[in-house]
Amino acid sequence: MCIEKRPVPVIALATVVVVMALGGCVGDEPPAVESLPTAAERVVEVNGVAIHYFDFNPDAAGTPILFLHGYSGSGYESYFIQDDLADRRIVAPDLPGLGRSGKPEIEYNLSYYLNFVRGFVEALGLEEFVLIGHSLGGKIAAVYTALHGEMGMTSTLDSATPLDGIGVVSALVLIAPYGLDGEAGDIVGFLSNTGNLVNVSFNLHSQTLIDVAVRLNIFHDSAKIPEDLINYIASATFYTENGVKALASITRNAIARDPIDWLLPEIAVPTLVVWGEKDRILPFRHAEAFTALIDGSRLVAVPDCGHMPHVEQQAVTAHAITTFVATPGVAGTGITAPAEQ
């Protein structure tokens, strides 16, 4: 299935270009993070890389949740739904190359991240879990589930061989997942396809640029942007040399390559897709296309919400997840898709 590629909004692009030129300089000081949930922070080594992760509700009795964040994001994002999912342990790593995890100088492609998830699951001894993935993390989560947790690791996904073992996904939640062929008609895709502009834009790690990008594209209601989350991501990724290099590599590889349409029909576990109706990064039309490729999946549309429902509309999103996980075999969640956009 192919989604029509649409041009980047002229206003959004023009604003980003102006901010890149005038809005800040490489010498900006990284922003402070004042309310990080430090009690939940952990570090584990996976495949030789130090992985920083958050471990919320560690003593909860329910099937644990593994949360994979999106492009340039952080496991910190799961903090905003952990109270509403207090009956389940939530483990949320900063993916390699991002946040406070190690940033080796490698090609950050989809196969690398699948291998990471496998290693992380083994390191923590997660035998069975609910897998939640947002945006790029949704792409990784969907492929991990389709391949039953592991594959023969190559630089592309031209072929894939499922292998059995630890890390069984009991249910899958995809929040505004990325991965369909033709989805690159947004700013991330624009950067992916313009060569050196990737490096130029990320090397201008200006807080002004970051703020404008978030307000223009990520959230529908800018009043709901958690400043500490943005500051954490900015200071841990954009203000480190290896973070800038890693993000550029992620853009060129994990984002720009390996559409996963052909693998989605292989997903055989109960699946919930959550999407903001006002998503500017991946507009809602992608939601129906994504859901149609996963047999039996359910779609929840989150009103008045942009690309991060788990942060911007955390109560609605957590309720949808709770309802789904409690009764994964029952159709419907009480929330339906909006009229055609």
Image (tube, grey):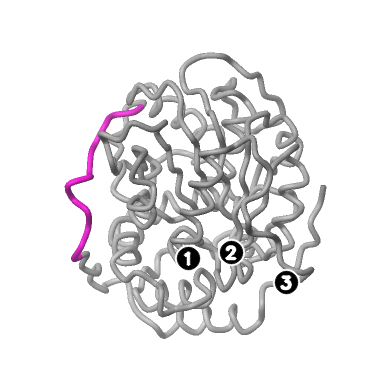
Q: Amino acid at mark 1?
A: Gln
39 within the magenta span = yes
Please tell me which residue is depicted at 70% across the width and 61% down the height of the picture.
337
Q: CA distance from mark 2 to mark 1?
A: 7 Å
Q: Of callouts 2 and 1, which one flags the residue occurring earlier in the amino acid sequence?
A: 2
Is the C terminus in the top left, top right, bottom left or bottom right quadrant?
bottom right
Q: Nearer the viewer, mark 1 or mark 3?
A: 1
Does 67 sit above or below residue 117?
below
Please tell me which residue is depicted at 42% across the width and 55% down the height of the picture.
73
Mark 3 residue element: loop
Q: Where are the magenta residues, as a range?
A: 34-46
Mark 2 surroundings within 10 Å by alpha-carbon count, few (fewer than 14), some (14 through 19), many (20 or more): many
Mark 1 residue element: loop
Q: Of callouts 2 and 3, which one flags the residue occurring earlier in the amino acid sequence?
A: 3
Query: Label for residue 313?
Result: 1
Tell me whether circle 2 and circle 3 mark residues in contact (CB < 8 Å).
no
Mark 2 residue element: strand
Q: Would you name the residue on which mark 2 appears?
A: 302
Residue 242 visible in the snapshot = no
Picture coordinates of residue 132, whole percent (x, y):
50, 43
Does 94 sit above or below residue 305?
above
Query: Label for residue 95?
Result: none
Nearer to the camera, 95 or 149: 149
279 within the magenta span = no
Picture coordinates of residue 334, whole percent (x, y):
63, 56
Q: Amino acid at mark 2?
A: Val
Mark 1 surroundings within 10 Å by alpha-carbon count, few (fewer than 14), some (14 through 19), many (20 or more): many
Q: Of callouts 1 and 3, which one flags the residue occurring earlier in the amino acid sequence?
A: 3
Mark 3 surroundings within 10 Å by alpha-carbon count, few (fewer than 14), some (14 through 19), many (20 or more): few
Q: Would you name the residue on which mark 3 appears?
A: 7
Q: Please give left or right for residue 208 compared with residue 194 in the image.
A: left
